[in-house]
């Protein structure tokens, strides 16, 4: 079984589009979908879809790492897939994951493109097709064998912002064999709509560098919140 885990905070509109799509993709597959709502979620996300393949989990603590870990603990799947609510997978999503894990890999990511046509955004997306400095971000949709995830003790819940990169660092330290599937996800460009292209990219670069040299999660969160504007107050 594949468990698709979606951490969400006030993502009603995105979930309204994403969940029916995932249900359709998984009709002939052994899949469960778990939406892990943040402790501060205040919209009616959990009323969107009443289907046996979809479960809603209301977390009692804050943080995306907490949400994903809580969902992983109650999941029934042998394969865990961590998908953001504003990311649309390709039609062969589930088949791609199964094929990758059946050929010797323990984990993997997807390349992606943005939902808005832009030369600059195409440049950004091109970096997701190969292993590099920014590999491991949450938008790339980590998929991993559950036994491997548990071996690595899941996401670090002290990480408020860089939980994906921190987990990827431990994957590399433990020599987890991973791949990047070059079949693009479609990622929301909404961050760029509230901030300039230059602002987002310079902020991302700064945050990754500061993370790699050891800045604390709290300092990284403060810096992020000063640099990046969002359409709603972040739960992290």
Image (spheres, helix red, strand yellow):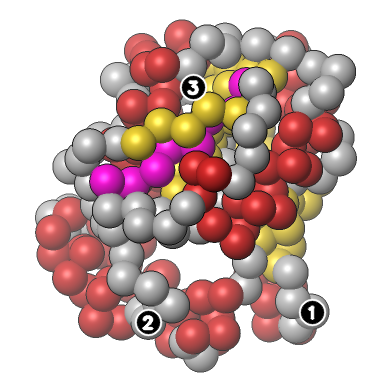
Which residue lies at the image location 69% right of the left edge and 48% below the top edge? 18
Q: Which residues are magenta?
A: 32-39
Nearer-N-terminus badge (3/2):
3
Residue 229 bears which disc, if any?
2
Does residue 162 appear anywhere in the picture? no
- Name the mark nearer the viewer: 3 or 1: 1
- Residue 39 location (% of width, % of height): 27, 46
**Mark 3 near mark 1, Cβ–Cβ under 8 Å?**
no
Badge 3: how crowded within 10 Å, few (<14), some, or many (20+)?
A: some
Cα–Cα span, label 3 and label 2: 35 Å
- Name the mark nearer the viewer: 2 or 1: 2
Residue at mark 3: 176
- Residue 74 location (% of width, % of height): 41, 16
**Mark 3 near mark 2, Cβ–Cβ under 8 Å?**
no
Q: Quadrant of residue 227?
A: bottom left
User: Is residue 61 shown in magenta?
Assistant: no
Q: Which is nearer the eye, 30 or 80?
A: 30
- Residue 52 location (% of width, % of height): 65, 21
Nearer-N-terminus badge (3/1):
1
Residue 22 bears which disc, if any?
none
User: Is residue 34 shown in magenta?
Assistant: yes
Cα–Cα span, label 2 and label 1: 21 Å
Residue at mark 1: 117
Q: Which is nearer the eye, 106 or 12?
A: 12
Q: Locate the N terminus and report the quarter of the image it occupies.
A: top right
Which residue lies at the image location 49% right of the left edge and 22% below the top edge? 176
């Amino acid at each position: 079984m594949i468990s698709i885990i979606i951490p969400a905070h006030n993502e009603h509109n995105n979930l309204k589009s994403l969940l029916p799509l995932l249900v359709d993709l998984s009709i002939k597959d052994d899949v469960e979908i778990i939406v892990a709502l943040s402790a501060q979620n205040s919209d009616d996300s959990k009323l969107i879809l009443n289907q046996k393949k979809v479960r809603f989990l209301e977390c009692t603590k804050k943080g995306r790492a907490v949400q994903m870990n809580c969902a992983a603990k109650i999941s029934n799947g042998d394969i865990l897939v961590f998908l953001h609510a504003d990311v649309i997978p390709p039609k062969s999503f589930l088949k791609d994951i199964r094929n990758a894990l059946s050929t010797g890999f323990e984990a993997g990511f997807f390349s992606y493109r943005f939902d808005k046509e832009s030369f600059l955004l195409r440049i950004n997306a091109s970096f997701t097709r190969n292993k590099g400095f920014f590999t491991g971000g949450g938008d790339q949709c980590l998929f991993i064998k559950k036994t491997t995830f548990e071996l690595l003790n899941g996401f670090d819940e002290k990480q408020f912002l860089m939980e994906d990169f921190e987990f990827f660092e431990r994957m590399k330290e433990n020599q987890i064999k991973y791949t990047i599937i070059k079949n693009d996800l479609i990622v929301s460009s909404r961050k760029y709509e509230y901030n300039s292209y230059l602002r987002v990219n310079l902020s991302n670069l700064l945050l990754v560098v500061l993370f790699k040299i050891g800045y604390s999660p709290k300092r990284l969160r403060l810096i992020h919140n000063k640099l990046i504007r969002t359409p709603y107050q972040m739960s992290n």
